[in-house]
Image (spheres, helix red, strand yellow):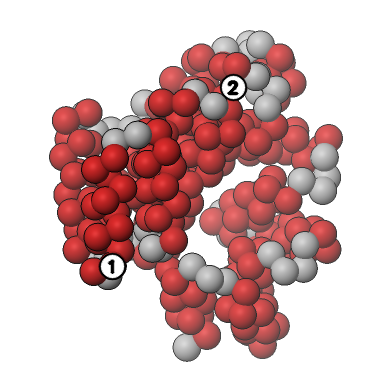
């Protein structure tokens, strides 16, 4: 396929897109009944944490059981700072509509859920489940449009985050950034991977590229703070963290920043 001819080559052969996405999906370790039971428990736990008004509104929307209600539920859960339930509802919506934008949104929120789990430490047993939702969402897009850049980045991000061979994901990202050096999503992911792998100077380089394009990017500011802190540049790191705190609206990300500032 065109996608793989351009982005994913091994020394001996070109891996098929189907095979590559199978590798990603195999990282979902739970059976379907186990997943359904875990999501049911997640829903009940999440519902209990809502305000009384939000509980009433979500119960009303859930009773409608329509395509429109799934979209409303996803937005409502996201507004309640719960990307996990938002991702679950977004994935159900995408299965109903088959719309490319819905699938891309589903993948984006599912990956946000993976970040939420990593940062907050909550629901760690569901990390692979949401990685699988993300990979399936992007797979649905690539099955119709094998050159969709956003979906390519999404699949690569799944791999880098543990949903497949990380270096395959890096190869895809590097191939994309070679053609589009100003792609913020790719630069952010490469910067995050550089932090994870201890390449802090490289992370600073990638994140500077993001901030030159978008100085108000809260994620880039936070990650720049992390990289600089690891390099021993504490005061500079604190400055970036304070800028991020002023911009960030999601509570779990604000809590992460506050932990660095304490």
Q: Is residue 116 visible to the viewer in this orientation of the structure?
A: no
* 46 up-or-down from 162: above or below: below
Q: Dot 1, crowdedness within 10 Å: few (<14), some or many (≥20)?
A: few
Q: Position of residue 56 (x, y in %)?
A: 24, 60
Disc 2 target residue: 142
Asked whether, in this view, residue 144 is left or right of residue 112, the answer is right
Q: Is residue 6 visible to the viewer in this orientation of the structure?
A: yes
| Mark 1 secondary-structure assignment | helix
Mark positioned earlier in the residue sequence (2 or 1): 1
Asked whether, in this view, residue 125 is left or right of residue 84, the answer is left
Asked whether, in this view, residue 154 is left or right of residue 23, the answer is right
* 118 up-or-down from 72: above or below: below
Q: Position of residue 94 (x, y in %)?
A: 45, 30
The residue under the point 61% across, 80% down is 246
Asked whether, in this view, residue 178 is left or right of residue 131, the answer is right
Dividing the picture into quarters, in which one does residue 121 lie?
bottom left
Which label was assigned to residue 53? Answer: 1
The residue under the point 25% across, 61% down is 55
CA–CA distance in space, label 2 to label 1? 40 Å
The residue under the point 75% across, 33% down is 175
Q: Position of residue 73 (x, y in %)?
A: 37, 48
Q: Position of residue 45 (x, y in %)?
A: 19, 58
Residues at discs 2 and 1 in contact (Cβ within 8 Å): no
| Mark 2 secondary-structure assignment | helix
């Amino acid at each position: 396929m065109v996608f793989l001819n351009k982005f994913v080559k091994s020394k001996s052969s070109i891996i098929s897109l189907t095979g590559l996405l199978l590798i990603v999906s195999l990282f979902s370790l739970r059976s379907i009944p186990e997943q359904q039971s875990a999501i049911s428990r997640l829903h009940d736990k999440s519902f209990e944490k809502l305000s009384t008004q939000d509980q009433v509104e979500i119960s009303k929307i859930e009773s409608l059981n329509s395509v429109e209600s799934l979209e409303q539920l996803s937005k409502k859960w996201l507004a309640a700072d719960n990307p996990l339930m938002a991702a679950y509802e977004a994935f159900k919506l995408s299965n109903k509509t088959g719309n490319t934008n819905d699938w891309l949104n589903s993948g984006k929120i599912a990956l946000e859920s993976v970040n939420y789990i990593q940062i907050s430490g909550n629901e760690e047993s569901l990390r692979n489940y949401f990685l699988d939702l993300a990979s399936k969402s992007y797979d649905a897009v690539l099955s119709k449009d094998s050159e969709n850049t956003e979906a390519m980045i999404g699949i690569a991000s799944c791999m880098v985050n543990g949903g497949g061979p990380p270096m395959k994901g890096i190869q895809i990202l590097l191939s994309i950034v070679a053609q589009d050096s100003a792609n913020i999503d790719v630069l952010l992911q490469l910067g995050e991977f550089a932090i994870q792998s201890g390449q802090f100077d490289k992370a600073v380089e990638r994140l500077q590229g993001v901030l030159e394009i978008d100085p108000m990017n809260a994620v880039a500011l936070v990650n720049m703070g992390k990289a600089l802190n690891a390099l021993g540049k504490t005061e500079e790191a604190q400055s970036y963290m304070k800028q991020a705190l002023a911009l960030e609206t999601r509570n779990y990300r604000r809590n992460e920043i506050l932990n660095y500032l304490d």
